[in-house]
Image: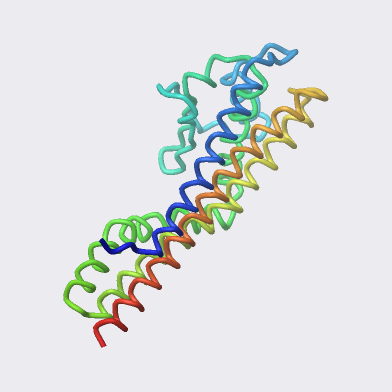
Amino acid sequence: MYFDPTYILVIIGAIISAIASWNVNHTYKKFSRVASSRGMTGRDAAEQILQSAGIYDVSIEHISGRLTDHYSPGEKVLRLSDSVYGSTSVAAIGVAAHECGHAVQHQVGYGPLKLRSMAVPVANIGSRLSWPIILIGLLLGSTGLAQIGVILFTFVVFFQLITLPVEFDASHRALKILDQNQMLYGNELAGARKVLTAAALTYVAALFSVILQLLRLILLTQNGGRRRR
């Protein structure tokens, strides 16, 4: 039975992603038990932050799930999950503030956010077509076709790369607003920072994982090409 040594790269990426996922869930769970002294819910915090930023055309909606929170620039809708919307915890307020950070980015025309939005269709194409094209290229012995698939996968890597500054900046804006508006105090703010840092590390892990996948694809297409020559 043939063992593909490049698969080790996939395993490494999966382990890193699993550790990051465990860390964010563990950190969120820890600070979801810590109630904020002001007693405001995630929705209350989001509404106050948006108003303080002069944003009145973004609606706040409740969606099901846990940590499914997101801001939709096209719809101008901020969606908060079950674990955030009605919760008064430090973790919930931190997450709500982070999503508001994206709304503020949208309002001020933050460059990386615009670039990420434009990159979504291309990244989707790369995600869907890269592997089929690579496999067909390897089966047909066409190194050129396989390399086209690799190029398509670089779009996925680029999307993950541009996501990092968007997410880190949103967290930075969130913590600054929470501090300036005195929505969280002292250890509460530190707790929110830990939650948002753990969440940001999942994006770092995702980037590292797709870079490892890209390296594997490059090795596979090169080795495939060499074996057929």
Residue sticking out furthest to the bottom? 229
The N terminus, quarter of image = bottom left
Residue sticking out furthest to the left? 140
Which of the 4 image quarters holds residue 41? Answer: top right
187 is higher (above) or lower (below) than 217: above
Q: Is residue 216 left or right of residue 135?
A: right
Percent x, y of residue 38: 73, 13
117 is higher (above) or lower (below) than 68: below
Q: Is residue 23 left or right of residue 187?
A: left
The residue under the point 45% across, 30% down is: 68
The residue under the point 19% across, 69% down is: 136
Percent x, y of residue 61: 45, 24
Percent x, y of residue 110: 59, 53
The residue under the point 64% across, 15% down is: 33
The residue under the point 59% across, 30% down is: 95
Percent x, y of residue 26: 59, 28
- Which of these two is toward me, 95 or 178? 95
Which of the 4 image quarters holds residue 46? Answer: top right
The C terminus, quarter of image = bottom left
- Which of these two is toward me, 23 or 59? 23
Q: How is the image coloured?
A: rainbow
Which of the 4 image quarters holds residue 3? Answer: bottom left
